Amino acid sequence: MHALITGGAGFIGSHLAEHLLSAGNQVVVLDDLSTGSAENLSSINDHPHFRYVPGSVLDEALVDTLASEVDTIFHLAAAVGSFVIRDRTLQSLRTNIHGTENVLAAAHRHHAGVLIASSSEIYGKNTKVGLCEDDDRVVGSPLLHRWSYSEAKAVDESLTHAYGTELGLQAVIVRLFNTVGPRQSGRYGMVIPRFVAQALAGAPLTIFGTGTQVRCFCHVHDVVPALAALVAHQPAYGSAVNLGSCEQVSIADLALRVLALTGSASDIIHVPYELGIGPGYEDLQRRVPDCTRAREMIGFRPLRTLDDILRSVIAEQSQPGLAPTVVI
């Protein structure tokens, strides 16, 4: 495989680049480092089959040039995190919609296979336990910035589907459910690295809202091999596929588990959404995936538990000389 990873200097993208290189593939990473980090690529910078190209998916000419050099594209570049969507809503919409269309158009011109990274945000406020790929979307007002990310990802999926059905593009959509692990930053609103950093620093763990919200977290090392397997699995093209864990935890219980595993004496405080994230944010009570389709297609089964995930993040943030970035 000669692969292009957009957003490859990000949390998931950098792990994917390492995985593909270890399997003997050639990898090109495109990233503007708006939320990614050059440090994430430090272990592979000198690899003979790796190349990093600074730039944005909004640069249509650059995307086209890179697409002409590869046979497979993993499109992970996106504006992510509740803080980013809150603070840069317009820029986020442009990146997530126009960037995806640039990638799809270039892939079609150059006959490359594509994996489009979508999100569990697609399902919006649908609280069904075991969300299937064909379940309805239940979203709030488009005037609330909370739902702009969901809307953008829905447009991305519709564009991908249309390129496939009308133009024959070979593309698979992957809906990620809270992928976490080492290298994920808490500065954009991600809860596990944020809680761990607060606990290690002895700062209060800040829960937005009641803490009764239920989520499922999946380790990046379980997700990345599945991405590579799906893009190589011909029957997956034209489909949307959930990837995530079904191990449920409330945010309040998650905070307690972080305190127990770090041995921290930090307090836990509750912050109203309006103060913690800002006006225009609407949360949902529960989001749990059904990953039957991924299991039947590629044998996907997460191997790592939530405690495994937490220990890996704690170990990374506890490295000597590394001061955790504490975000309220």
Image (cartoon, rainbow, N blue to C red):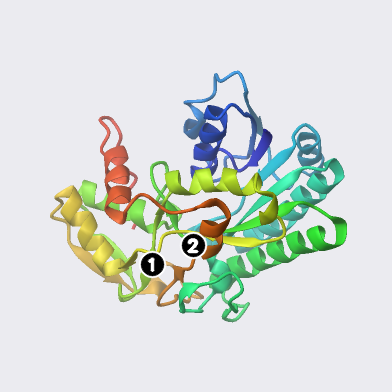
Nearest the viewer among 181 and 317 is 181
Residue 70, percent from left and from top: 74, 34
Q: N-terminal of the two: label 1 or label 2?
A: 2
At label 2, the amino acid type is Ser
- What whole-number distance in Å separates the C-alpha atoms at marks 1 and 2? 15 Å
The relative height of residue 150 versus residue 40 in the rendered view (above or below) is below
Label 1 CA crowd tier, 10 Å (few <14, some 14–19, many 20+): many
Locate residue 17, reporting x and y percent. Answer: 56, 35
Q: Is residue 111 left or right of residue 80?
A: right
Percent across and percent down for residue 286 are 41, 75
Residue under label 2, please give it. 82
Q: In this picture, is 138 found above or below 270?
A: below
Q: Quadrant of the C terminus?
A: bottom left
Tag in front: 1 or 2:
1
State the count of labels.
2
To which quarter of the image does residue 137 belong? Answer: bottom right
